[in-house]
Every structure is written in structure tokens, then in C-alpha cells.
Image (spheres, rainbow, N blue to C red):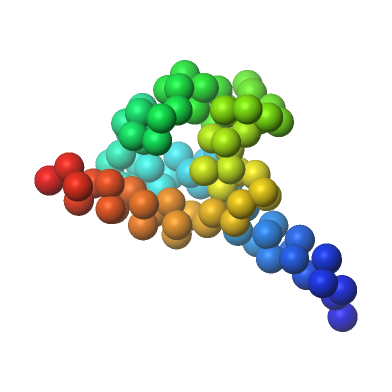
Amino acid sequence: MFDSKKARLHRQLAVMNTAEEVRTIFKERGVSLSYWARRHGFSESLVYQVLSGKRRACRGESHRIAVALGLKVDKSVSCQDIDRQLIADKEEIK
């Protein structure tokens, strides 16, 4: 049986997204990364750097981007959460 710390880590790892999963969600929803970056107040180029792995996302804005996309464990953001967010954003545009 897992102790609580191991169980929590296991749950968090279960919802971490890969960069490829994030790109797929954006593509399926027809939302550009640039639009998402502007909408959430992030640097467009930094979003691309984080997703491509050119930025380690250890602190600052790059870390916040990784957390918002569910690439980092600090916040449990699943692909479903991103998908719902993109749908809501797209509905506001209409």
C-alpha cells in the first residue's frame, strides 16, 4: 500500500502532459499557441521554447507556462482541463 506522499505523487504523475499531447489538444481544437499565450498573458516565444524543450521551465514565467500547460507536477492540469479551457476560449470568440 502507498503511503500518502507516494500516492499523491502517483496521482500527480498520472495527469502530467507531454509537449506532444499539449500540441495535439491545441491542434484538435483549432487554437493557436500564440493566441493562448496572448490570452493568458505569456510571451508567445517563451511558450514555444517551453514546448520545444529549449527552456527548462525551472522558475519564472517559463515555469508558470509549464504549470499552466500541465507539463510540470506543481499543478495538476490534465489534457481534459486544457481541452475544456480551449473550448471555453473558442466560445468567447464567437
Report whether 14 appears left or right of 36. Answer: right
Q: Quadrant of the N terminus?
A: bottom right
Residue 25 versus residue 12 in the image, above or below: above
Q: Quadrant of residue 8?
A: bottom right
Residue 77 image offset from top left, x and y in percent = 54, 54
Q: Is residue 33 visible to the viewer in this orientation of the structure?
A: no
Q: Is residue 13 visible to the viewer in this orientation of the structure?
A: yes
Pick out the residue farthest to the left. Answer: 94
Q: Nearer the viewer, residue 21 or 78?
A: 78
Report whether 68 appears left or right of 84. Answer: right
Q: Nearer the viewer, residue 29 or 59?
A: 59
Q: Quadrant of residue 55?
A: top right
Residue 52 image offset from top left, x and y in percent = 57, 27
Report whether 39 appears left or right of 21. Answer: left
Pick out the residue farthest to the bottom. Answer: 1
Q: What residue appears at the point 82 percent right and 72 percent down from the top-left corner?
A: 4
Residue 42 versus residue 45 in the image, above or below: below
Residue 92 versus residue 44 in the image, above or below: below
Q: What residue appears at the point 17 percent right and 42 percent down from the top-left corner?
A: 93
Residue 5 image offset from top left, x and y in percent = 83, 65
Report whether 90 appears left or right of 62. Answer: left
Q: How many marks?
A: 0
Q: Quadrant of residue 49?
A: top right
